[in-house]
Amino acid sequence: MGLDRSFALDRRAERIDALAAKRKKVIASDQMIEGHYPVFADWAHGAHFWDVDGNKYLDFFLSYGTVILGHADPDVDEAVVREIRRGFATGLMKPVQTELIEELLGIVPGAEMGMLLKTGSDATGAAVRLSRAFTGRDRVVRWGYNGWHDWCAQWDHGIPAVSRALVDTFTYNDLDSLRAVFERHRGQIACLVMMPFMVERPAEGFLQGVRELTREHGTLLVFDEIRSGFRLALGGAQEYYGVTADLVTLSKAFANGYAISALTGRADVLRTLDTVHISSTYYANADAMAAALATVRKLRSGDHLKRIWQMGERLQSGLGRLVEEFGAPIDVVGHPPMPFLDFHFGDEDRNQQAKRSFYTATIREGVFLHPNHHWFISAATTDHDIDTAVGAARRGFEALAEAGWLPADWRRRQEDGAV
Ligand SMILES: Cc1ncc(COP(=O)(O)O)c(C=O)c1O
């Protein structure tokens, strides 16, 4: 697998492109499997993409989970091209905006109104500002990854202490830890913004408990469904788990890769928009709206989500068999449409080293599995693709064994057919 052209381009980019210099790969530099992961993409189709060196990858990253139907979906791209040819940027509303929101209201539980923005951080940031305006309170509680704005950025550097001081978090699946935050800041918390889950699934009654606590404290519940929306079910985790938030943020998988996000929920809260400043020149652009409408209609009318679940289940059971066979301290986790492997090799340092062995082997097989981010399944993924991925994972487990990460008896277990 050559990457010469990629690295030459990379050296060129590093000197002039601040993002390329800092975070030039989809995997942060310190977690990189240097020399193996693709850097510059050339083109993509269905479940695959090709890098500028002509290497082909079976894609389980799917642009951070935005590409739900598969790359270059003809129906979505045609809808966008039609809109582009008709002049998509007037700054005025186009009918597609209303049609898309009508569509959303029919899909997302609790959605009485909606608004369309561009990025996920736009939507979560808007949810926080509206919640503060609606409740007249300043404090925020949050959990999971919610974007890069001051109230939720992962690193403190560059963020005023005063912004940080207004935000608390809690332990997932631990209602007591959330209760303690509410007790500490009684009557001051505007909203709780949380992903309904990350890789760990919600314990029985946990999301319901969160819903009750927020109600009890007059705090708005915002489900950040930017990853789970349109993927776990068409109506997201709200539909799947039967819990309805006050506001919901959506983005990935909404438009098969085009840049758009949405905030939906209670009309009384969204109407507070009259009194706050949330706006962008590009919110009215109709290209991504056309993509979203085509994506959502396609998802609604076909069995794409069912297939995504089936493919995810097939992948997870294949991985589960390998874990057994090799006796590896690894858990197969996540919901089938967004699976992942949880490594338990002692501490974070050892986990990262073991991941290096595993994921170097899988990428060499041309299967793009991310070491530190959910994987995603697209509707273009076939049974054959899943078998290819499981085959690559077998190479990953063999690499772990060869590097001495697995129990000494792994070969005997394999011969005995531990599965
Ligand atoms: C759950 C969740 N919320 C918010 C965001 C932020 O979205 P964006 O990167 O488009 O600003 C992301 C992005 O990964 C996300 O996964």
Image (cartoon, helix red, strand yellow):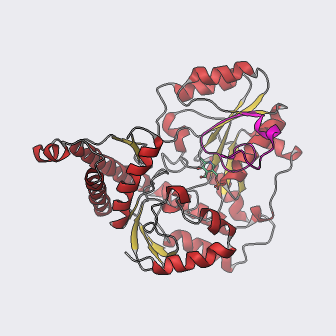
Q: Nearer the viewer, residue 403 or 385?
A: 403
Look at the picture and state if 4 lies above or below 373. Answer: below
Tell me the quadrant of the picture where the N terminus can be found: bottom left
Left or right: where does residue 187 sit relative to residue 26? right
Residue 406 horizontal/vertical position (percent): 27, 45
Is residue 277 at least partly visible in the picture? yes
Q: Residue furthest left?
A: 416
Q: Is residue 339 magenta?
A: no
Q: Nearer the viewer, residue 401 or 209?
A: 401
- Residue 24 occupies quadrant: bottom right
Tell me the quadrant of the picture where the C terminus can be found: top left
Left or right: where does residue 105 sit relative to residue 332? right
Residue 91 horizontal/vertical position (percent): 81, 68
Q: What's the residue at 42%, 67% (across, down)?
A: 36
Is residue 83 at least partly visible in the picture? no
Q: Nearer the viewer, residue 362 or 351?
A: 351
Left or right: where does residue 18 sit relative to residue 69? right
Q: Of helix, strand and loop, which mostly describes the magenta segment?
A: loop
- Residue 210 occupies quadrant: top right
Residue 21 horizontal/vertical position (percent): 64, 67
Residue 387 horizontal/vertical position (percent): 27, 59
Q: Residue furthest right?
A: 275
Q: Which residues are magenta?
A: 140-167
Look at the picture and state if 83 lies above or below 347. Answer: below
Q: Is residue 162 magenta?
A: yes
Q: What's the residue at 70%, 50% (across, down)?
A: 123
For the image, the number of numbered tags is 0
